[in-house]
Structures are given as structure tokens and as C-alpha cells.
Image: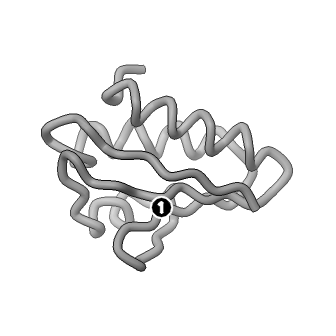
Amino acid sequence: MFVKDVVVENQVGLHARPATFFIQKANEFKSSIWVEKDERRVNAKSLLGVLSLGIVGDTAIRILADGSDEQQAVEALVALVESGFKE
């Protein structure tokens, strides 16, 4: 398992459009991927799951992955978050 923390710094957080970009990126990988916020963990490949976390700007989240490409998956998602969700 590979884990990394990141702060969502864009003002709107992880809502509709940014969440869609996040899920599309997560679905590029074979590994199981999760997002954690405040002890709640959801499937990073599920739009409803990610939206249900209510991630707003300046929120710390944890991205976890388990599988053959776990490190690449986490690094790619952290980079996406840090970019402000610019593909």
C-alpha cells in the first residue's frame, strides 16, 4: 500500500468538475484507490463517493492505493490536486 497526504488548495475544493478530473485520473490505474478525509474513506473511482466527502478548499486529504501501480497512481493524483485540477 502506498499513501500520501495532500492539501486541496483550490477555492472550490473537490466538487463537480475537479472531482470528475480526479476520478478520470484514478480510473487510469489498475490499483484500488481510496481518498480519506477525517477518518472517512471512499473509493477514489466513485464520483458519488468523492463528492460525499464534501472536500472544500484548504482541506487535507489522504490518497491511498493498493496494487501493481499503486505508487504511480498516488503520485499522479497528488500532482493533479497540487496543480489545482488543471489536466
Q: Quadrant of the C terminus?
A: top left
Q: Taking 73 as reference, is 69 left or right?
A: right
Quadrant where the image shows the N terminus: bottom right
As drawn, 57 above or below 82 = below
Front in this rendered view, residue 20 or 81: 81
Q: Which element type, helix, strand or loop, lies under badge 1?
A: strand
> Which residue reaches farthest left?
11
What residue is rendered at 56% in x and 45% in y?
26
- At label 1, the amino acid type is Val
Q: Residue 72: x, y in percent?
A: 72, 37
Q: Is 35 drawn above or below residue 23 in the view shown?
A: below
Relative vertical location of residue 31 with respect to residue 28 in this rendering, above or below: below
Residue at 62% of width from left, 45% of height from top?
74
Along the viewing direction, whichever of 60 and 63 lies nearer the viewer: 60
Residue 35: percent from left, percent from top = 48, 61
- Residue 44 or residue 1, whichever sits in front: 1
Mark 1 — residue?
A: 35
